[in-house]
Amino acid sequence: MKLHLITGGAGFVAVNLTRRLLQEGSAVLALDDLSRGRRELVAEFDSNPSFIFRQVDCSDLEALSAAIQEVGAPVAHVWHLAANSDIPAGVTDPRIDRDRTFLTTFAVLEAMRRHEIPELHFASSSAIYGDLGEREIHEDIGPLQPISNYGAMKLASEVQIRAAVEAFLPRADIFRFPNVIGVPATHGVIFDFIRKLKATPDQLQVLGNGTQQKAYLHVDDLIDAMLHVSRIEGRYNVFNIGPKDDGVTVRMIAQTVRDRVSPKAEIVFGEGNRGWVGDVPRFRYSTQRLAASGWSPQLDSTQAMVRAVDEIAREELAE
Amino acid sequence: MKLHLITGGAGFVAVNLTRRLLQEGSAVLALDDLSRGRRELVAEFDSNPSFIFRQVDCSDLEALSAAIQEVGAPVAHVWHLAANSDIPAGVTDPRIDRDRTFLTTFAVLEAMRRHEIPELHFASSSAIYGDLGEREIHEDIGPLQPISNYGAMKLASEVQIRAAVEAFLPRADIFRFPNVIGVPATHGVIFDFIRKLKATPDQLQVLGNGTQQKAYLHVDDLIDAMLHVSRIEGRYNVFNIGPKDDGVTVRMIAQTVRDRVSPKAEIVFGEGNRGWVGDVPRFRYSTQRLAASGWSPQLDSTQAMVRAVDEIAREELAE
């Protein structure tokens, strides 16, 4: 039985990954400092003897190392998902992304060296690319100019991992995530819109003019892609993960949420095509490398969005 | 009179930059923790009332901020040169590059925000590119896969600066340095060869088979290029700095040093075309952007190397 360590183990993606790994017969050691992750999200696995949860700040090398030591069995894979996920918070205070994203990656690498863990799977982000205008964004594009601290510290993490592969780490996969949606939702535009409509059912205020377009992947597809890549040969594998389409507009998301949650609400748009500092307005995301490796998503951006709106609405409205 | 802050102010490049800035009538606040920089290297400027030196660890935001406060006048430019410069040391212990390169950049940016300093000039490195084989390396190339912690943390610094330009910083220049040579030398292959020959005048041991080829720029040309770029218009300017040629081989450097220092010594080569982990064997470095901006070096790699061998030999042999 293979043991998988998941950092950020009480977060949105981790819950879905844990479910899949346990279903496949693996064991999971989930670590999370519970600063943004929530213990109840993984409570469904507590009765499974192959699941262990520990409250650990993974940026603390000694605490992380002690948790690995304590479990007794050798760890085969690290799925490194722990990071700051609040982009605007990191723009206000860059220490958040520095500490919670970059320094956590640094500690994870040191723990892997110390405990001789051979395989790292890292949740990077499409935010590492910055604003490349209308160019199609493939994995080897340049220049890389992330415009948020979030993107900067994801990229800093990637390159530290790359240097670790040169020095000691047998294998690393870099997943560059798009916007991922599904449940359990803890943040994101759909989640925000539903919360807003719960608070003011007659009006939905939207940041920006709604023309921002984003590609969305459903979390079920994401987990599928991550597991697929983790089984490809290679020492250092970088993959954009995403749908094949160019995405849906914020306007369409707002309308879908409004129709699902509070059909009579008025949608009020702001100005400009950027909702906040560090937000990239348009994005042509190439997933050709992933497709060439034999994987395609089940849902396109619109289908993923519509399904996630329904799932999150059920959860948030406790229907 | 403009006030320039130089971090790593007692290092090799800083000494040469300070000399030029003072000659041009500017004032210089030089900060250095003296971990690798040496106080005596800037002693020649102590009698100049426009020069202030303070021993400060620039990764310590409060100490850095206090030094800026104390000087009383507004700082117009930061030349951020402080970093770990020992690549192999950082491969052995990645904390060195993390703390001394990346976290120092982070603190410098925070200090610039706090004190509203508008212009940053950052000494990055060609090591951010990693091993791109025979491709010509222009500034916008991808993928960026640094293979040393040194290169990784220089790139992490660049992208943190890029995000700062988006959030608050009016201007940043990124200089991607080649191998820079000249005096006062504190490290590098010429320095090492001369020291080795001082210790064992009959033999010079060379790491690798000597076929490694590197481009070298003389520090006089480097300072010239940095000042040139700092006067170009633009908010975020990235420039490779280097000679126009493909460089000189380690074999040729070894011979030049031997002929200058100990003509009868035997040169003994090792095996392979890499001297150490993280060392890139061959490098085609495009400086077309710099040339298009109107600047060219006075010396090519060979001329720079021959001049530097003579300068360093004079210094080291106390002729």
Image (spheres, coloured by chain):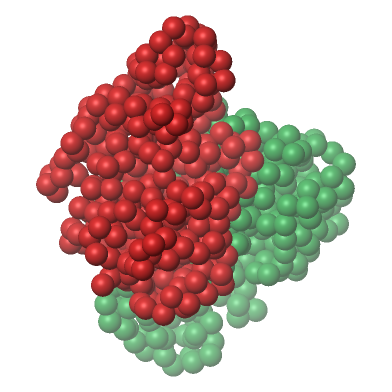
Chain colours: A green, B red
Q: How many marks?
A: 0
How far across and how far down the image is residue B183, in percent?
38, 39
Residue at the image position 20 percent from the left and 53 percent from the top: B228
Residue A161: % across, % down: 56, 42
In percent of width and height, residue A40 lies at 75, 68
Q: Is residue B111 among the parts visible in the rendering?
A: yes
Task: Determine the image quadrant of residue B284.
Answer: top left
- A267 to A308, vertically: above or below: below
Q: Position of residue B4 (x, y in %)?
A: 34, 65
Q: Is residue A26 above or below residue B169?
A: above
The residue under the point 81% across, 51% down is: A67
The front one of A237 and B71 is B71
- Quarter of the image for residue A259 reads bottom left
As drawn, A159 above or below A94: above
Left or right placement of residue B283 versus residue B230 in this view: right
In this rendered view, identify the residue nearer to me: A73 or B12: B12
Image quarter of the N terminus of chain B: bottom left
Q: Is residue B271 visible?
A: no
**On the rendered image, what quadrant is the C terminus of chain B found in?**
top left
Extreme-front residue of the structure: B319
Residue in the picture at 36% in, 72% down = B75
- Residue at 42%, 34% (x, y): give it: B315
Instruction: Report the side of B304 relative to A222 (left or right).
Output: left
Viewer-proximal residue among B10 and A252: B10
Is B187 on the left or on the right of A131, as rendered?
right
